[in-house]
Image: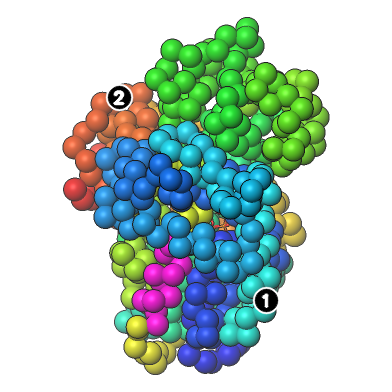
Amino acid sequence: MTTANPHDRIVVVGGGIAGLATALHLAPLPVTLLVASPLGQQASTPLAQGGIAAALGADDDPALHATDTLQAGAGLSNPDVAARVARAAPSCIEWLVAQGASFDRTASGDGLILGLEAAHSRRRIVHAQGDRTGRSVLEALIHAVRKTPSIQIMENHRVTDLALDANGAAAGAFCAPWGSEGSEEPILIPGRAVVLATGGIGGLYAHTTNPLTAQGGGLALAARAGAVLRDLEFVQFHPTAIAAGLDPMPLATEALRGEGAMLVNSRGERFMQAVPGAELAPRDVVARAIFAQICAGERVFLDTRHVLGEHITSKFPGVTALCRAAGIDPIRDPVPVRPAAHYHMGGIKVDDQSRSSVEGLWACGEVASTGLHGANRLASNSLLEALAYAAWIADGIRGMESRPSMVQPPSPSFAPWHRSNSRNQQSLCLQQIRSVMDRQVGVLRDAAGLHQAVRHCSALTHEARSIRERDAVLVSLMIATAAYSRNESRGAHQRLDHPHLMPEQHTEMTLDQALRIAAEIDNETAAPVRRVA
Ligand SMILES: Cc1cc2nc3c(=O)[nH]c(=O)nc-3n(C[C@H](O)[C@H](O)[C@H](O)COP(=O)(O)OP(=O)(O)OC[C@H]3O[C@@H](n4cnc5c(N)ncnc54)[C@H](O)[C@@H]3O)c2cc1C
């Protein structure tokens, strides 16, 4: 085993907004930043089109932002967390500007342009370069990180296991250079704290807007280290992914509906008209309405022509380019859309400083469950959450005492590990997972489908041949198990067989508990998972 850099450093895993913001806030403490790909690639952050929510308008207030967040969260968002994050939002935008990000300003240059998105009661979405917010912000952060001497960047290094000490506390990470997984000894990067900022799970679904590598790898790392995961069943499906045969699917941002774009079916009917909020109803409502049309044999289109016409090219250059790359001219034609897995509200359960239940292990960004999003995320709150928590994580780690520790070797691995030649390579096992998750753990769920999904995933645990496959199967199994166990419909989790609300409770589980419950489900004697009010 190679031991690299035996310093008292902090290991940050992930090169999206969460990882980079955490590394920057930690400066000048020494940080090793481990990223599975080159910086700027294979992350959700550069794909973010909508923007970042912050109560900056004269008619707005953080309390209103928090109220909208709680409303979207359908009873499972934590009011203290929502209030704290909403209060932090204006300073997060200022911090980004100080890092070199620039946001779209009004013609006079006095203020930021504030956009409207679904379920926000005020215009409060700040953008950079129109719909290129994520890419623009990420580029500024990459530039800042590369200039910061305390941050050692290791690109193309995928973390395969957390390093634990004899007490089970996180003491670093084992990683493998890209393409060498399983064929070489893992490299140990020791650290007094580890921050997982590994993003979401959309890549586990056949229809997704996420990079295909977003397969919940960080959830698996934490789960295998014994961490408690929370509310994994809550997966947000974006209603308007562009249905043009691309994988992952490009997104037609919600801001288009904010500008007045309409949803119509193949017969030209505006089917959202009768629904409260119409096209700007909460995401889960719109996603289900579109899904119902598709199940009824219709195609669904987002029509921007009457409200934007040719202006779509200047106001939404990113969407225009994505449409054209998919062979669609949005000035002339309505854009075909369908729901796709987009954002994971569930994640590693963390406290108000973003500490997990494993000592020394922290989580930031989409991989964390902070209590902000509850059962459904309010649009443009996720970049904000990552920024707010990155600062709080740095404060927490700064206040931590250094603890010397002896790292235990990683647990026995799958053998043989197969070399993967492409980051996006789809093995048969991954194809099966994506298909099962899409069909049975998707927009609409029921006991029979979830039962099949758990059984299918259980069977696939014996077929996984690489670390990536193993982790994808474990995370899918945990999501399906959590979804099977929640006998109600709330937010993004909709059960055809349990359409009503039950008393508000979170789902919490460790990997051992999930495997036990999955075995019971397999035997059709499922016991309920631990529920916490
Ligand atoms: C199309 C799209 C549009 C969106 N629009 C918006 C929006 O407008 N506003 C908003 O607030 N949110 C939006 N979101 C959601 C938001 O972009 C994400 O939630 C957010 O960017 C997640 O940031 P992150 O840093 O947690 O993860 P990511 O940006 O996904 O970064 C994860 C990083 O972890 C690395 N990684 C993963 N596993 C490992 C491993 N084992 N070892 C090493 N590295 C690893 C990856 O390579 C990557 O660098 C959008 C998402 C998508 C997909």
Can you say whether 483 is above or below 174 in the image?
Answer: above
- Residue 335 vs residue 216: left or right? right
Which amino acid is tagged 2?
Answer: Pro
Tell me the tag on residue 219. Answer: none
- Residue 225 vs residue 433: left or right? left
- In the picture, the quarter occupied by the N terminus is bottom right
Magenta stretch: includes residue 481: no
Which amino acid is tagged 1?
Answer: Arg
Report how far apart the C-alphas of labels 2 and 1 lie in the structure. 50 Å
- Predominant SS along the magenta part: helix
- Residue 307 vs residue 364: left or right? right
Question: Is residue 469 at all visible to an observer of this figure?
Answer: yes
Q: Is mark 1 within 8 Å of ligand 1?
A: no
Can you say whether 418 is above or below 280 in the image?
Answer: below
- Residue 491 vs residue 126: left or right? left
For the residue pair 27 and 218, the one nearer the viewer reads as 27
**Residue 424 at x, y = what percent?**
69, 52
For the residue pair 408 and 138, the one nearer the viewer reads as 138
Kind of element beneath mark 1 = helix
In what quadrant does ligand 1 lie? bottom right
Question: Is residue 295 at all visible to an observer of this figure?
Answer: no
- Residue topped by disc 2: 499
**Residue 263 found in image quarter:** top right
Residue at image position (55%, 12%) is: 270
Magenta stretch bounds: 387-398
Residue at image position (58%, 29%) is: 259
Tell me the tag on residue 146. Answer: 1
Alpha-carbon neighbours of circle 1 within 10 Å: few (<14), some, or many (≥20)? few
Kind of element beneath mark 2 = loop
